[in-house]
Image: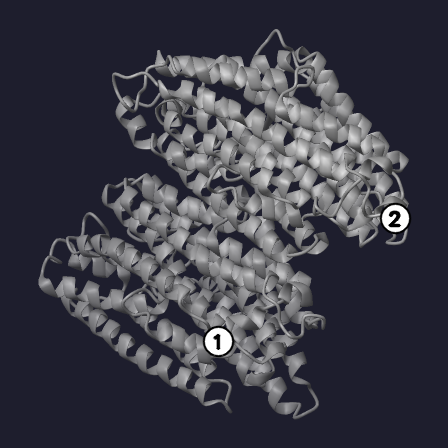
Amino acid sequence: MNFSIPVLTLIMLMPVIGAAVILLTPRERTDIIKTIAAGSFLTSLLLSFFVFVGYDRTVSGFQFTEQTSWIQELGIGYHVAVDGFSAPMLLLTAIVAFCAVLVSWKQDDRPREFFSFLLMLVAGVFGAFMSLDIFLFLIFYELVLFPVYVLIAGWGSKNREYAAMKLTIYLFVGSLVAIIGLLVVYFQAGATFDFVKLQQGVLALSPERFEQIKPWFIAVFIGFGVLASIWPLHNWSPDGYAAAPTAVSMLHGGVLKATGAYAALRFGVQLMPEAAQYYLPVIVFLCLANVIYAGLIAFRQTDLKYIIGFSSVAHLGLVLLGITSLNELGLNGAGLELFAGGVMTGLMFALVGMIYERAHLRDIEELNGMFRIMPLAAVGFVIGSLAAMGMPGLPGFPAEVMIFMGLWRAAETPSLIFAGQLNWWFSWIAIAGVLTVVITAAWTLRVAYKVYFSEPKNLELQKLPGLDALEKFSIVFMCGVLILVGVMPNTVMQVIQVGVQTILASLTRASG
Amino acid sequence: MAYSVFDPSHFLAIAPEIGLTLWALVILAVDMFSARRIPRRTLGILAAAGMAGVLVLSLLIAAPPATVAPQIGGDARSVLGGMIRHDLFAFVFRVIFIVAGILTCLVSIDFRPARAGGEYYALLILATMSMGLMAASNDLIMLYLATEASSFALYLLAGFIRDTPRSAEAGIKYFVFGAVTSTIMLYGLALIFGLSGGQTHYGAVAQALAGADTRMLAVLAVLLIIAGFAFKTSAVPFHFWTPDVYEGAPTPFVGFLSTASKAAGFAILMRFLLYVFEPPFSQASVVWVQLMQPLAILTMFLGNLLAITQSNIKRMLAYSSIAQAGYMLIGVTAFGFAYSRQSSEAAADAVAAVIFYAATYMLTNVAAFAVVSIVSQRVGSEEISAFNGLGRRAPYTALGMTAAMLSLLGAPPLVGFLGKLFLFRAAISDDLVFLVAIGVINVLISVFYYLGIVRAMYVERSANDAQPMIVPAATGWVVLVSSAAILFITVASTQFWSVALDAARALLN
């Protein structure tokens, strides 16, 4: 399908235009500023819904392509397109971003700056998901880091500057490591940053030349993995989320981390499939540690934001586990988990933000009986937790089933790193990974009981105002998306499957 | 006859230098005759405006033609008795010097301790002028005279803060080191003069030496001359003066010294070595081609490792500038190897990479020193801790400094990344994989100290956090314009690269 309108560029540009208009709006007109922010995200949301629906599922590969040359000497160009994997990611970004503005409606501390930075952040995320030029991707990546830093350091809560700097340094250094790995590929395989051409260049390499770039897969995967909070490099994430304002936690936990997993998949696995088959069966242990370790820590925490922060680390661990399985089931599961988990994390952070904004408390020991003042939030939390622990009827269930089935199947593939063996440990990883369901159930039940359904001890809390219409709308909206995808996973799966097919094709080509 | 017959139009080749010299005299005259009626800042603005005028005029009338009709028996671009080569290579470097000069004049206006008067700006203009001659020189005598002329102006400027001993020490130290290395270089030039039977024009020297430069004396001459160039570019092992001089000299001037003077060093280095010891025809060329790689490696490591340990911002940036020279030496190494295997395309690529890097490094580093100049005056300290809390006290200036640091580091999408990519690509195409690996390791080392500044600005707190820091207009504009230029070059890098490539081709034929 060829569209004469550059839809993808428009999706990315809407927030940029919004930010520019906001900067021209008088400082006092806060309602207009917020309306512009919500309006530009709504436009992006509609456009990305259009892309999601308009993506031709019968033809695989990249669609909605826009391509112009830029710095030809270095093989850099403006090349954006979506495939089945990235189209749902654009939709996810738009959903979470739209809701993030709605729940930040009471943000009256320098709203002009706050919303323009927020818009720039989301423009960067959109750009990262759609760019097929690695240099362009890196530009968007750095474009995201900067507003995140400013938003956390400028509008965050306690310890905000420390957390913002820690987050920025982790992600920046991670991106440098990934860049070095990618530069090796760049120099060995055709001196182009264009993903499609580079992929062909890697395929055309002689086995000896490929051996030289193979170890650099680790740099790319782990480097981008830092953004997906891969264990033991996840430390920035809970600190960062605890300090960040609600909208940033939602976007970072729900969407930005997905960018890391997406980049590790696209520029790591899809670019160097043979290397992925070689190293991922070892890297899988890190991802397992994500799931178990972060889940257990989430259970031990009492600060609500830390709990959700660690749970998002665990949830990205599931995604990475799905990727390491390198088969259809696992990758499909990873894609669905990215989408569902993104909405779920966004929802959870929004709910925590609603409590914190009113009570200025985040410790679950001090909060109680919140069900009475915000019943809808309690319902939202229960739906979110059920999705997190993988209850049938919510998208977490099909996603987790596919991931664990994928891991189980991966045990039958021959190991490349230990010749003559099978990757037998994958079945044990699947078994250990299933523990996450129990761990998630444990912490979500604990939080749900203590915060929402316990006897109201602190009567001050009962005098707090309830939810307003916008907050209610955003909870209903995100829960609606979760239930819709949970009941009819095919709405999203159909598209993700098409994307996974392309990745699988490159994998079989590599092993065949 | 290896050069063009004299023609009055040849004076166009040195038109920028003529204009600059005249303007330096005008500044001196205005300062002298107007007694105290003209404030110092007006002089600075006048100097900058004059240089800008010269720049515009030279771009309009004195830019060398892209193609020159071949002349039988000679090099049509070699003019004025063979002293000067009127080519795009020299012209591009001139533009770099003059832009650096303009920005430095503007930053100097706000630098109180130097009490910069007419003589300060006149010296700055004369230094710029002689650097232009360095880049264009095509003759041993011209090379030495131009280098000395620029050095003398720089010695005086380094010691310009008259009432602090540290600045005087910087001036003296720079002078002593400079005089010694210049003597060493002169000795090398004299050897070549003798070996070639009394020739001074590059082309004539090369012809006279052809085939006969295997003697130890020729090798010695190459080594001695490289010592002189290493001093100018502050490459190891002639870097010792750099931190001390940078620490003591007036800060805005250090921005000039660390960029324009270094670029001039690279210009003469590449032209001299190529024209006089042309690989692979000259036997002695093996020496310099092989020597550049270890020089690059040592320079990068020394600069980056020592920069980490510094607590004074100017010393840190001094070691950073040594490291940056090391990155540019990667390009020179690639150039030597490419030319040795007679691939003029790859050689042009390498030279263009050095030019591109030198130009962008100039903009970045001048901006960085502009910020240092203002912060050290306001806080009264040149320690890195003076930057504590700058993110809150002067958000836009801190943003400019962050961009400069990240670009020096080479983080995408800033122009430093593209510059390093061009250099690394040139080296890779000559199979210098080891050298590039060393370069990448050095980039990783440099993360520590470049991000250290960013951390100080945004994370550390100072006692005066709540009090905004007022940035004077001229310096603010310099930071803004150079940051904007850095962004613009990133976006329009194709255009800038093609100019650099044309300049490189002009050097090669």
Can you say whether A160 is above or below A116 in the image? below
User: Which secondary structure lies at badge 2?
Assistant: helix
Tell me the residue at 35%/19% (across/down). Answer: A423
Q: Position of residue A35 (x, y in %)?
A: 86, 39
A376 left or right of A446 in image = right
Asked if one can make out residue B91 in the rendered structure from this viewpoint, the answer is: no
Disc 2 crowd rating (10 Å Cα; few below 14, some 14-19, many 20+) is many
A138 left or right of A11 in image = left
Q: Position of residue A44 (x, y in %)?
A: 75, 29
Residue type beneath disc 2: Thr
The chain letter for the residue carrying disc 2 is A
Question: Foreground: B111 or B398?
Answer: B398
Q: Nearest to the eye among marks 1 and 2: give it.
A: 2
The chain letter for the residue carrying disc 1 is B
Tell me the residue at 34%/48% (across/down). Answer: B508
Q: Which residue is mark 2?
A: A30
B129 left or right of B32 in image = left
Q: Position of residue A422 (x, y in %)?
A: 32, 16
Q: Which residue is mark 1?
A: B126
Do the numbered discs 1 and 2 sit on residues whose CB atoms are within 8 Å? no
